[in-house]
Amino acid sequence: MNKCHTTNLNELRQLGAVRFQSNSQKILPGDVFVCRQGPNWDSHQSVDEAIGKGAVGVIANKPLELDVPCLLTPSFSNSVSLINQYYQYPQDKLMQIGVTGTNGKTTVAYCLNALLNRRFKSAYTGTLGCQYSDEQVELDNTTPDAISLLNLFHAMEQSGVTHNVMEVSSHALSQDRVSIVDFDVVVITNIGSDHLDYHRSRDEYIQAKLRLIDRLKPGGVAIINLDDELAMAMIERCRSKAQVVTFSMQDPSADMFAFDITSSCHGGQFRLDYDGQQYPVSTSLPFTFNIENSLAVLAMLTAMGIEISTAVEMLATMDHAPGRSEVYPMQNGATAIIDYAHNYDSLRNLLDNVRRHSQGRVYTVIGVTGDRLADAADIGELCSTHSDHAFFTTDNPLGVCLEALFAAMGSKAVGGNSSSHPDRERVIEHAVSCLMPDDVLLLCGKGPEKYQYISSNKSEPQPYIGDFEALMQAAGNR
């Protein structure tokens, strides 16, 4: 048996770790298991499982006797620091771009990464996983924990990546998951209300978002949406520590100001006032809220030294992020839109834009995740009042019974304007059968996801065909 003993960097190197893993269920042969004592679970109790799966060593925070080498550190944060030294601080060898916001962060981060890859070797880390070189890594969270990030940054560095565009969630900021990262550029797309099941108040949620500014390198750049009601608080947070670049669709004093705006479900155009010059801008991203996202992307490109005229040209050929306002014309003249919108603010923006541009009826397929039960009534009311019919169905119930979710969604819904059914695929098939020319069908919440999280701990996700596949199958059956 090996007793845990205080470790140093040389001893860690002797383990020859393939990578480090703090989740015992995800250990692969050659990994080193890193223990953590949290508020709800002490993973020191999982070392036998980790060793059984092939862990070649363990980093612990309390003495253990094991069949593999066991290295002792005084705390999990010390373990992270040791691993950081082992990898030789890979995060510092990348230009780090952080994106947060209640809405738009996936679109902004994903699209920016796609454009950067035309000039550099860039990576994306966020809701859609981690993508770099030819690698696609699935992630449990929008922003991974510090150890997972270090594994990813090391792999990125080894493959020649120079830039990393990362979605940074409010959970990650409040839990210090990105404390190892100093960002070169950050953007806050907007701050609404979300995740109040976790953040005890909207003010706590706001403060969590603002912490991204605190992670900027000295002299870094903060991109601020001047149209957000909290813009002044964001700018104040930057005082004496960051360069501020603002964008707006309402305030001509912004560094980047969009005017003469036109948009539809097929794209948008506007004129851009920047640095005393005006530029015609086109984007393939649909709806007015994506004008805001396009401005954020332009501001970030220029913050990284790309000429504005070049940035405008790049934007015109930018593809949308998977599951974000994907528009599909139907054979009978109707339109289907797949969108990840799942919180109140994003759904309101989407529905308002669709109503503004649609000539026929609007049908909405929507569910509420189990952690948003408190918002279900308002979301149900919103979707039923803004749609000719709202179909309530499953979207990651996370241990909450569907009856409770459906009852909450229907509690404030307009009478006769909604129905509920647990089988999402069948609901989409029925919704497609209702479509007439000029109608619009919104499939909200799931985006490209191919699973349903039924249990609260997200274990053993239930396979799901996917909204796109369900839509195509339903359309083909007509």
Image: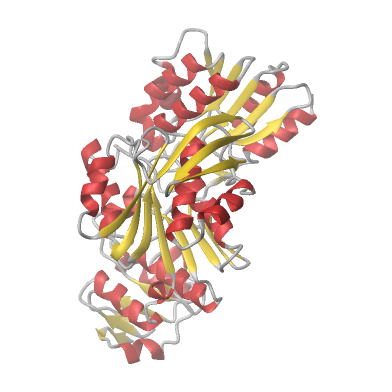
Q: Quadrant of the C terminus?
A: top right
Q: Is residue 125 above or below residue 398?
A: below
- State the residue in front, 10 or 316: 316
- State the residue in front, 174 or 69: 174
- State the residue in front, 449 or 315: 315
Q: Is residue 462 above or below residue 41?
A: above
Q: Is residue 73 above or below residue 172?
A: below
Residue at the front extreme, as displayed: 276
Q: Position of residue 202 (x, y in %)?
A: 25, 36
Which quarter of the picture shows residue 117? bottom right
Asked if residue 140 shows in the view, the reply is no
Give the side of residue 469 with respect to residue 7, left or right.
right
Q: Position of residue 395 (x, y in %)?
A: 50, 35
Q: Residue at x 60, y 53 (%)?
A: 314
Q: Position of residue 193 (x, y in %)?
A: 32, 35
Give the side of residue 448 with respect to residue 156, left or right.
right
Q: What's the colour scheme?
A: secondary structure
Asked if residue 401 shows in the view, the reply is yes
Q: Residue at x 38, y 46 (%)?
A: 255
Q: Residue at x 20, y 59 (%)?
A: 240
- State the residue in front, 320 or 361: 320
